[in-house]
Amino acid sequence: MPSPSVPDTASSAKAPGIGKPVLLVVDDEEGPRTSLKVVFKNDYEVLLASNGADAIKMARANRVDIAILDILMHGMSGVDVLRELKQIDEDIEVIMLTAYETLETARQALRLGAREYLNKPFDIAALRTAATNALAKRRASRELKTAHVRLKELQEEIGKSEGAIARAGDTAGNILHDLNSPLTVINGFIEL
């Protein structure tokens, strides 16, 4: 059986949009990690990390769509992991779990971009709903960025085309003028 800090999938980087979405579960307790893997194994590629440092390494090596983080862990806190994950990919959707809820921790997590803040023991239906909503937002963010890039490309093409059309228009106008002058003379002789 692999150690809890080793990912359950290949360690090579994943290409966006290929296969199942990737869910990173970070908790220093084996019970919640294993439970979450069982809950989500049919819908996600589930990566498990027992500490923040391992989670950050996994996020750098794999495209992570959603992360579920325990807030209170040995070493890096869940809030610290959240901050690091958002630096790796600002669109990673993060769900925070805690058994020790404080208003300040909740505010800090939400300020840093956490999508949800749920209590342990977690309600499976609420967690599944949170993950579904997080994945929908992740996909919408990705589509929006793709559309924005395509819009910029189209704007650049139009800018280039406008210049080419203007140049072509001048050239076409000059050609028509040059052709029209002798035709006018020829037409005059014919009428005479």
Image (tube, grey):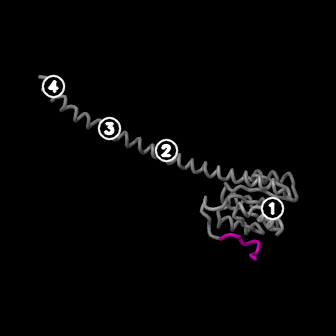
Q: Which amino acid does label 3 sit on?
A: Asp
Q: Which residue position holds label 2?
A: 155
First in sequence: mark 2 vs mark 3: 2
Q: Which image quarter is the C terminus in?
A: top left
Cα distance, mark 2 to mark 3? 23 Å
Query: Circle 2: is it few (<14), some (14-19), or many (20+) Cα within 10 Å?
Result: few
Q: Give coordinates of residue 80: x percent, y percent.
A: 76, 61
Number of numbered discs on residues: 4
For the residues carrying marks 3 and 1, which lies nearer the camera in this image? Answer: 1
5 within the magenta span: yes
For the residues carrying marks 4 and 3, which lies nearer the camera in this image? Answer: 4
First in sequence: mark 3 vs mark 1: 1
Q: Main secondary structure of the magenta part?
A: loop
- For the residues labelled 2 and 4, say whether their Cβ atoms are less than 8 Å apart: no
Cα distance, mark 1 to mark 2? 44 Å
Question: Would you say 12 lies left or right of 26 here?
Answer: left
Numbered mark located on residue 188 in the image:
4
Q: What residue type is labelled 4?
A: Gly
> Quarter-wise, where is residue 170 in the image?
top left
Q: Which residue position holds label 1?
A: 70
